[in-house]
Amino acid sequence: MKIFGLFILEIALRAVAAEAGRTRAKESAEQLFRRLMASDSPPANACYVLAAMLERKRVLKQVKTEQTPEGRVAHLRTRVTGDVFIVPDPRLRLDELENVQNEVAELTSRSRAKRIMFKRTC
């Protein structure tokens, strides 16, 4: 009976660790989005794709959409803190999506690499 209880505990601990890993991944995507939006010249395509990802994960919620002289912009609010971000629609074409996907993947991997290097130096 003890072995069975330990087995159940092991499964529960693995489930918690997996959930914690998913939570960290969400936080890092949100942190990357915040960092890019706070920069002087945020990459419009990458910010738009990250915003769509975070909206799909229910981290961001679209409050409204406006048509401006520069184009359409979306007002997105974080569900937890209520922070509002204004993200311009870059009007991506289907043939541009692969390049933008690679750009976002590079930004996220660079962000993770910095975090790993920081952990190793501390």
Image (cartoon, rainbow, N blue to C red):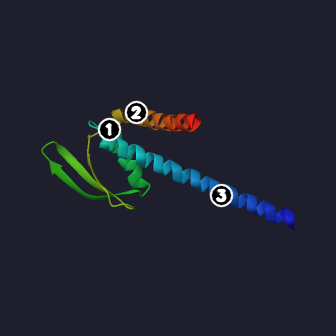
- Quarter of the view holding residue 5: bottom right
Earlier residue among tags 2 and 1: 1
Q: Position of residue 55 (x, y in %)?
A: 38, 54
Label number found at residue 21: none
Q: CA distance from mark 2 to mark 1?
A: 9 Å
SS label for mark 2:
helix
Near mark 2 (Cα within 10 A), the count class, few <14, some 14-19 or many ≥20, is some
SS label for mark 1:
helix
Give, as a three-letter code, the residue at label 2: Glu
Earlier residue among tags 3 and 2: 3
- At 87% from the left and 68% from the top, the residue drawn is 1
Near mark 1 (Cα within 10 A), the count class, few <14, some 14-19 or many ≥20, is many
Earlier residue among tags 1 and 3: 3
Q: Position of residue 63 (x, y in %)?
A: 27, 60
SS label for mark 3:
helix
Q: Which residue is mark 1?
A: 45
- At 45% from the left and 33% from the top, the residue drawn is 106
- Quarter of the view holding residue 84: bottom left
Left or right, 15 with respect to 40, comes to right
Label number found at residue 15: 3
Label number found at residue 103: 2
Q: Position of residue 82 (x, y in %)?
A: 33, 61
Image vertical order of residue 42 relative to residue 23, above or below: above
Left or right, 117 with respect to 78, comes to right
Give, as a three-letter code, the residue at label 1: Asn
